[in-house]
Image (tube, helix red, strand yellow):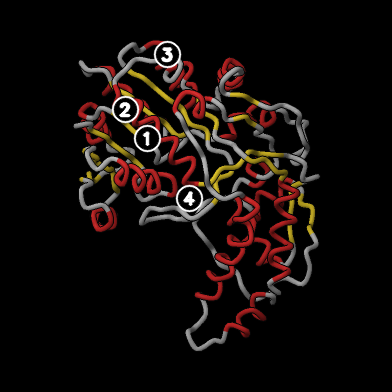
Amino acid sequence: MAKIFLTGATGYIGGTVLSLLTKSHPEYAIRALVRDSAKGKIITGTFKDVEVVEGDLDSADILAREASNADVILHLASTGHLKSVETIHKALASSQKPSHWVQVSGASALAAAELADKNRAPGDGSDLVFNDLTGITDIRSIIQRHPSRAIDNYILQVAAEESKINTALVFPPIIYGQGLGPGNKRSVQVPALAKTTLERKRGIQVGKGLSRWGNVHVEDVSQLFVKLVEKAVEGKADAQVWNENGLYLTGLGEISFGEISKLVATAAAKKGLIPSDDVEVLNPEDANTLLPHGAVLFGTNARSEAIRGKELLGWAPAGESLLDEIPKAVEREAEIKIKSFPHHTQHNQVAQLIKSDTITIQLDYSL
């Protein structure tokens, strides 16, 4: 029986991966890291056969024990917690058996050169497109040229030096759709943009709005993680799937952030939630104030062709498009505001209040 250890079980990606994995492979023995007993009850209440382990990413002894006992590690809780990555590596390196380690990263890796360029204006476009099959060396190169990509560089070093550890890095771009797990079901970029548009009663974009990221439905990117687990469980060595070649882009559709901003504003205006579909141009400072990491997540380019997963793993994304999702995201953010009012408040009253200056709702953007 394959032993899987997963972090981030109550998160957006981790919860969706766990949902898909338990449905497609009930024969796997899955252990999930949770912060406390309350989180544990959330997981076991939904996934009866999943065993929970209480601890956090700083619980080195627990992480080391679970990683060394597992056949496959899915580290989905964080893209930037170096200590936990080091702990997992040390545990696997000291183990006597081969292991597979799948680490979540982010498409901002593809924007590392832009982020290092102090003269670049956020919101400008780019013709650079990364390909994870024929252009894998370009992806490795941009990571290795930028020490700020600490986790990515660490995993690449493990891939080059450790013969018993098989690694894969997955780079999600804009993720959209409702998560399937029992915890966080909400993504970051599109919901944050919709929320701020409703609050300010106008659309917003960073600079010229020409920058582009790929996008992918949460169920589709989660299916790629499942495919990697399945490949790991097969136990066959494949240098094209793992280690220095184990870099997976997941961007499918592509649309500029300016276009996304306009679509959000149009959807909100059609529902009478804002007065028009006008879009305000933000400078980087204002973008960072109004949006989570605004100048980076809404003002850089992370253009990609996601080929490797399809060609080597049979990944077949089939989720609805971002264009279909945007009106739904606006509806959900408006509903959050509606639910914040007393039960006796009528929906038409709420709609009017949403268009006023009186509402400011703080939301947690964490994955």
Q: Which mark is residue 88?
A: 2
Query: Could you tell me which residue is drawn at 28 percent across and 36 percent down?
Result: 5
Nearer to the camera, 331 or 134? 134
**Which of the two discs, 4 and 3, sits closer to the camera?**
3
Residue underneath mark 3? 239
Residue 75, labelled with which disc?
1
The residue singled out by tag 4 in the image is 366
Locate residue 284, reporting x and y percent. 72, 45
Q: Under tag 3, what secondary structure?
A: loop
- Whether residues under marks 2 and 1 lie with C-beta atoms below 8 angstroms apart, the answer is yes
Q: Confirm or deny contact between disc 3 and disc 2 (CB under 8 A).
A: no
Please tell me whether residue 283 is drawn above or below residue 64 in the rendered image.
below
Q: Of circles 1 and 4, which is in front?
A: 1
Where residue 254 appears, x then y in whole percent?
A: 67, 40
In 3D space, how far apart are the residues under numbered discs 4 and 3 (Cα atoms)?
A: 34 Å
Q: Secondary structure at mark 1?
A: strand
Of the 4 image quadrants, the one containing the N terminus is: top left
Q: Secondary structure at mark 4?
A: loop
Q: Residue furthest bottom?
A: 344
Q: CA distance from mark 2 to mark 4?
A: 22 Å
- From the viewer's perspective, is residue 209 above or below residue 237? below
The first of marks 4 and 3 along the sequence is 3
